[in-house]
Image (tube, helix red, strand yellow):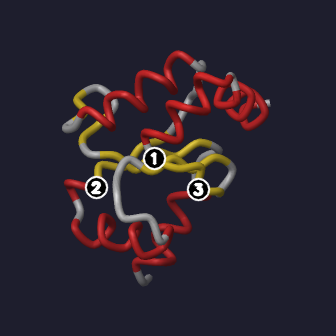
Amino acid sequence: MDVREKIKGQIASDKIVLYMKGTPQSPMCGFSAQVVKLLGAAGAKFSSFDVLADDEIRNGVKQYSNWPTFPQLYINGELIGGCDIITELYRKGELQQLVAKAQG
């Protein structure tokens, strides 16, 4: 299985998927920690993948999404964005709506 197919499978494995540095219990950067905090505040149940643990996935996700930085949040298979976008969506109440709809 090539890396693109592996990433597609990971994104399809859950309604909410976060590619981040570290884990939700031990984020390895402030941006990842912020997104985990916001997802928690929005009541999200999500899967996560530590991009620091797998160079192939880290580089592959950047190409897959055409987005150069982490974290990257996917809801229902769609890239939502990184920390700045997630923070803004949360402030507007839109992240909570996306999470509620996905977890329906």
Q: Amino acid at mark 2?
A: Val
- Residue 93, horizontal then vertical, whole percent: 68, 22
Say which quadrant the N terminus sits in. Answer: bottom left
- Residue 52, horizontal then vertical, whole percent: 20, 54
- Residue 98, horizontal then vertical, whole percent: 71, 35
How far apart are the two marked residues, 2 and 1, measured between alpha carbons? 14 Å
Query: Which residue is at 55% across, 57% downward?
Result: 11
Q: Amino acid at mark 3?
A: Leu
**SS under mark 3:** strand
Q: Earlier in the sequence, mark 2 or mark 1?
A: 2
Query: Which residue is at 41% across, 29% downward?
Result: 36
Residue at the spot of label 2: 51
Q: Amino acid at mark 1?
A: Gly
Query: Which residue is at 51% across, 47% downward?
Result: 73
Residue at the spot of label 1: 82
Q: Which mark is residue 79?
A: 3
Q: Earlier in the sequence, mark 2 or mark 3?
A: 2
- Residue 87, horizontal then vertical, whole percent: 50, 31
How far apart are the two marked residues, 2 and 3, measured between alpha carbons? 16 Å
